Image: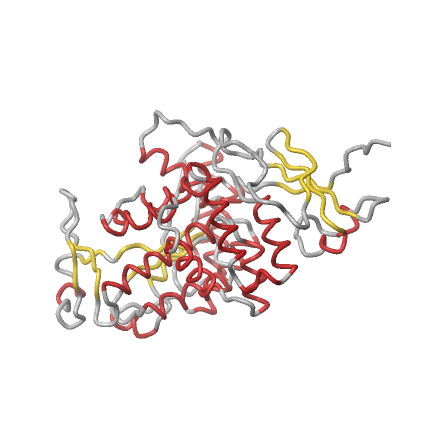
């Protein structure tokens, strides 16, 4: 309990003396209320970029194998709710593949986190460290490893276990790359939530279906990046995951939009009018990482949303009044319904706290920026506000 007061003292020091600049703390697993209070104290003092929640796995058998009593789901849910309510950035840490975990349980675990509105999910590769309990049980758990080209590390990357074949391992990585591209970026935020909660397609099925679709489009920039990362073990490198954000939100943004549109139109739920509408809104609110990424109309026609104007890095959008309630744009539908034409007009402003992309910066520097921007995605998500329709000619 004293840690809350200790956190307040550290925050007071920052306000009075300007230091320490930032803090990082490893949180107790089953004290969600106290952890949330401490995180808010540091966040209010602008000392906390994001708060990690280390879960490693959500599978009970796996947690027994790694001798770790993990955070209870009920405690995690309370903690995530408090962090979200207090607008404290956070992310879940998992490891793939741990002994006891299966491809199915890995997918199921991520799905349960998405359903509980996890802010951000990271699945680190399993690095088998020498002279650890798991290393001594390498044969028992049938751990197969590959070495990495790292002169300062003796870690081996686990690529197979008793439960996970090498093909399963690669499929799990592809699944997680889909999570990075679709969930962490909020690219399909509204649509994914609707499909899962309505029972039309669960999160796990959505990500798996996207993997299957990209497999049929191996020439896309996203598919090429994922397959090269898996083949070369580049997922071990720190800049690798954040580069996914750079690819889908900047470098190959238009091509990725086309890939998403092809994927969406190939799914059975595309027959659902509400799903089609939410897909359009997600495309318009897809965040921008940089200030110098071109803001253009999307390369496919919309059915419900009409883009009336593009200016100053924003869209002026009009949708039918009956659809407005499906969008969390403002608190009440009435506030954005135009007085005469039975439609809803709102502005999607993408001019937030982004920095420009700089080619002269190193890959590591750009990846660090991308990672920080997505970790605190609320700082770059567009702001949607009611707007008046442009004057119509008589």
Q: Give residue 325's position: percent from left, percent from top.
A: 71, 56
Q: Residue 99, located in which quarter of the rendered image?
A: bottom left
- In this view, the residue in front, 77 or 369, is 369
Q: Residue 108, located in which quarter of the rendered image?
A: bottom left
Q: Give residue 113's position: percent from left, percent from top.
A: 45, 63
User: Is 157 on the left-hand or right-hand side of 180?
Assistant: left
Q: Give residue 230's position: percent from left, percent from top.
A: 27, 52
Seen in the picture, residue 171 relative to 291 is either above or below; the reply is below
Quadrant into which the N terminus falls: bottom left
Quadrant into which the C terminus falls: top right
User: Is 299 on the left-hand or right-hand side of 346?
Assistant: left
- In this view, the residue in front, 307 or 293, is 307
Residue under the image location 30 percent in, 69 percent down: 101
Q: Give residue 35's position: percent from left, percent from top.
A: 45, 57
Residue under the image location 83 percent in, 31 percent down: 393
- In this view, the residue in front, 328 or 256, is 256
Taking the image as drawn, is residue 66 in sight?
Answer: no
Residue under the image location 59 percent in, 61 percent down: 194
Residue under the image location 69 percent in, 43 percent down: 306
């Amino acid at each position: 309990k004293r840690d809350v007061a200790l956190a307040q003292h550290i925050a007071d020091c920052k306000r009075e003396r300007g230091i320490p600049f930032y803090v990082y703390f490893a949180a107790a697993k089953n004290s969600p209320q106290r952890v949330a209070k401490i995180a808010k104290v540091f966040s209010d003092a602008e000392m906390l970029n994001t708060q990690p929640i280390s879960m490693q796995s959500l599978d009970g058998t796996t947690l027994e194998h790694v001798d770790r009593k993990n955070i209870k789901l009920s405690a995690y849910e309370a903690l995530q709710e408090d962090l979200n309510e207090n607008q404290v950035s956070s992310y879940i840490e998992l490891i793939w593949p741990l002994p006891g975990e299966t491809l199915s349980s890995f997918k199921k675990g991520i799905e349960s986190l998405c359903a509980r509105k996890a802010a951000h999910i990271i699945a680190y590769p399993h690095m088998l460290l020498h002279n650890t309990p798991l290393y001594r049980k390498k044969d028992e758990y049938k751990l197969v490893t590959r070495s990495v080209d790292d002169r300062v590390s003796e870690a081996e990357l686990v690529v197979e276990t008793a439960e996970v074949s090498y093909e399963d391992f690669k499929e799990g990585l592809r699944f997680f790359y889909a999570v990075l591209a679709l969930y962490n970026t909020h690219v399909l935020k509204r649509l994914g939530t609707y499909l899962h909660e309505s029972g039309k397609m669960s999160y796990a099925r959505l990500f798996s279906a996207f993997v299957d679709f990209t497999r049929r489009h191996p020439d896309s920039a996203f598919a090429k990046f994922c397959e090269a990362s898996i083949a070369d073990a580049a997922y071990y490198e720190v800049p690798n995951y954040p580069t996914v954000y750079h690819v889908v939100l900047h470098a190959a943004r238009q091509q990725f939009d086309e890939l998403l549109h092809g994927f969406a139109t190939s799914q059975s739920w595309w027959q659902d009018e509400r799903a089609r509408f939410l897909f359009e809104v997600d495309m318009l609110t897809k965040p921008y990482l940089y200030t110098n990424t071109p803001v253009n109309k999307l390369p496919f026609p919309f059915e419900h949303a009409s883009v009336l104007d593009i200016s100053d890095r924003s869209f002026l959008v009009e949708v039918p009044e009956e659809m407005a309630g499906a969008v969390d744009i403002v608190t009440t539908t009435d506030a954005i319904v135009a007085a005469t034409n039975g439609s809803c007009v709102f502005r999607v402003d993408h001019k937030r706290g982004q920095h420009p992309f700089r080619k002269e910066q190193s890959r590591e520097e750009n990846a660090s920026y991308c990672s920080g921007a997505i970790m605190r995605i609320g700082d770059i998500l567009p702001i949607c506000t009611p707007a008046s329709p442009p004057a119509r000619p008589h």
